[in-house]
Image: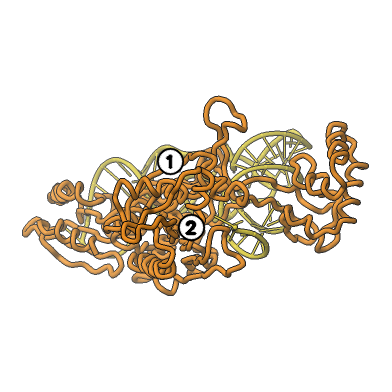
Chain colours: A orange, B yellow
RNA sequence: GCGGGAAUAGCUCAGUGGUAGAGCAUCACGUUGCCAACGUGAAUGUCGCGGGUUCGAGCCCCGUUUCCCGCUCCA
């Protein structure tokens, strides 16, 4: 059932109807790839983050951190993002082939480069641009001029018009090159010049790396130990798509584990297993989860080995978490660029070493969507269809609904008292509108695991029925024991 | 970024150039006896946005935005 595109649309629709996800800036026509978390969505998201945070920090060897989104621009030079985080693309309108502009030069021989530069010079009749081209040609030979012009914001498009597509040979069929860095730029202070440029972080990890020694010194941790952080990150993606899956603003849950270089393999394997189990323990079916190891030739610039935990979304397998061995790349680079030592002093061997880093980088937004997809179910009950979110108890936004069977004989008063007893311990919802069957179904649709109903017998003996979401079965328990009941059920 | 589809009430959708509609949902009143009950009444629309054609546009044309699908891409 999950393998048809309809499911995503149904989830999008349900998300809006029931307050999980709204489109950002909807009244203005929306903003591409931006989404808001509604009343239910923010509860689910917070529950996911809480489970992750607890699993990471309720142990001896991991410390928490919340670093700022804006960081010194040199951080991103050191990390490699300023140089490597670019992706200028063009398409051939004729044959639909896509090329990276920076690689296009390598696909053309010198003769073609010279020819295209000459043609550009001849065909250009805009005086300002013409003089720019002539200046370039006077300072460079034609081949070098090609490489400069192809990267030039103003001239690149004109030069592309003079080129033939390497695949189909059609001339002038390229789209405009989009020349940009995937990092969002902004400016600090009132003057918007190059000296005041800062970036919105494209990953939270660097905030951990630059604080490595601060955390170690203040907590007296010994290797191996980790630093965990949850926060927003931003990437100016060319295309957003698939609901929450590929967005420009997203939230990461990252834990960087610092180890002795010789132990890197051991901890990489260990964290792979721990992280996979985390998803399974929160209700994801093993069949919908897999590892995808990165082939060596596709590794990121900082990684020695890497794997993704992928989830089987309605649109196919997609990464929800990356686990990388980042080696000592980041700490070494930050030593280089900052001129400060980031070495760890081993008290036993009396050695100064630069630790290796095993990174676990989970997408909070992507996990959110995976948990939502996993939970979504359509069932037939007595000839009627019901839609139910089978969310894990720990993740469900609302833990229990409290319902008077009918609005008379004092039932609402008893139900309201139960609500007041429970409301500061659990996220609960009181509903007395319409028939009770309808109220059950409404709660099913937002994933509430328990429905507590006050009926005639409650008036006599203070017992209530508790209906379980997935089985729809009811048990009868004393209203005094509800708190203990929920506490037990929700903690497993 | 390319190609295809879509956008009308909160949701799902009908409306083929001539008065803006249905079902569900919402609200009020009545009713109520455990899985989307019923009656009566009410409220709800820049027909995604901007132009154009026309006596007249939700409908035709152009542009644009957003979403979905496929391709491409994802340091």
Residue B21 horizontal/vertical position (percent): 52, 47
Q: Residue at x 62, y 46 (%)?
A: A181
Q: Is residue A405 above or below residue A312?
A: above
The residue closer to the viewer here, B18 or A328, is A328
Quadrant for the C terminus of chain A, please. Answer: bottom left
- Which is closer to the viewer, label 2 or label 1? 2
Q: In this view of the protein, which residue sits in the foreground, A475 or A355?
A: A355
Mark 2 on the same chain as mark 1: yes
| Furthest-bottom residue in this view | A287
Instruction: Name the residue at 50% across, 45% down.
Output: A201
Q: Chain of mark 1?
A: A
- Going from N to C along the chain, the mark reached first, 2 or 1, is 1
Q: CA distance from mark 2 to mark 1?
A: 23 Å
Query: Horizontally, is A179 left or right of A474 in the view?
Result: right
Spot occupied by residue A263 in the image (x, y as percentages of width and height): 40, 67
Q: Residue under circle 1?
A: A68
Tell whether B51 sits left or right of A345: right
| Residue density around tag 2, few if under 14, some if 14–19, many if 20 or more, within 10 Å | many
Question: Is any atom of residue A284 visible in this view?
Answer: no
Farthest residue, direction right: A122
């Amino acid at each position: 059932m999950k393998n048809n595109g309809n499911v995503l649309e149904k989830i999008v629709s349900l998300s809006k109807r029931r307050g999980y996800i709204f489109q950002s800036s909807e009244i203005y026509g929306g903003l591409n790839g931006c989404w808001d978390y509604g009343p239910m969505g923010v509860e689910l998201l917070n529950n996911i983050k809480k489970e992750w945070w607890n699993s990471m920090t309720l142990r001896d060897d991991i410390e928490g951190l919340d670093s700022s989104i804006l960081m010194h621009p040199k951080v991103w030079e050191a990390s490699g993002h300023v140089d490597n985080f670019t992706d200028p693309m063009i398409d051939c309108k004729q044959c639909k082939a896509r090329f990276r502009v920076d690689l296009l030069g390598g696909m053309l021989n010198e003769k073609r480069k010279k020819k295209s530069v000459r043609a550009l010079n001849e065909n250009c009749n805009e005086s300002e641009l013409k003089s720019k081209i002539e200046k370039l040609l006077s300072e460079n030979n034609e081949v070098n001029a090609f490489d400069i012009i192809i990267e030039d914001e103003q001239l690149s498009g004109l030069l592309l018009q003079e080129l033939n597509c390497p695949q189909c040979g059609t001339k002038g069929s390229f789209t405009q090159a989009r020349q940009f860095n995937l990092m969002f730029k902004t400016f600090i202070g009132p003057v918007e010049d190059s000296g005041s440029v800062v970036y919105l972080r494209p990953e939270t990890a660097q905030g951990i790396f630059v604080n490595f020694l601060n955390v170690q010194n203040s907590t007296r941790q010994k290797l191996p130990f980790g630093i965990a952080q949850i926060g927003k990150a931003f990437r100016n993606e060319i295309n957003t798509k698939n609901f929450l899956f590929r967005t420009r603003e997203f939230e990461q849950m990252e834990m960087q584990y610092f180890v002795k270089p010789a132990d890197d393999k051991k901890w990489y394997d260990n964290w792979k297993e721990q992280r996979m189990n985390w998803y399974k323990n929160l209700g994801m079916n093993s069949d919908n989860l897999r590892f995808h190891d990165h082939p060596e030739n596709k590794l990121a610039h900082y990684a020695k080995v890497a794997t993704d935990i992928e989830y089987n979304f309605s649109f196919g397998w997609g990464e929800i978490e990356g686990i990388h061995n980042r080696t000592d790349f980041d700490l070494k680079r930050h030593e280089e660029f900052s001129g400060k030592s980031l070495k760890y002093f081993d008290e036993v061997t009396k050695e100064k070493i630069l630790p290796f880093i095993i990174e676990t980088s989970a997408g909070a937004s992507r996990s959110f969507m995976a948990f939502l997809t996993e939970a979504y179910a359509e069932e037939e009950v007595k000839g009627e269809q019901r839609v139910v979110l089978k969310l894990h108890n720990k993740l469900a936004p609302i833990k229990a609904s409290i319902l008077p069977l009918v609005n008379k004989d004092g039932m609402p008063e008893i139900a309201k008292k139960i609500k007041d007893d429970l409301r500061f311990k659990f996220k609960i919802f009181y509903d007395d509108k319409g028939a009770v069957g309808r109220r059950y179904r409404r709660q099913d649709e937002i994933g509430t695991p328990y429905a507590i109903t006050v009926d005639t017998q409650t008036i006599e003996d203070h017992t209530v029925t508790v209906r379980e979401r997935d089985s729809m079965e009811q048990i009868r328990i004393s209203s005094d024991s509800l708190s203990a009941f929920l506490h037990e059920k929700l903690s497993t």
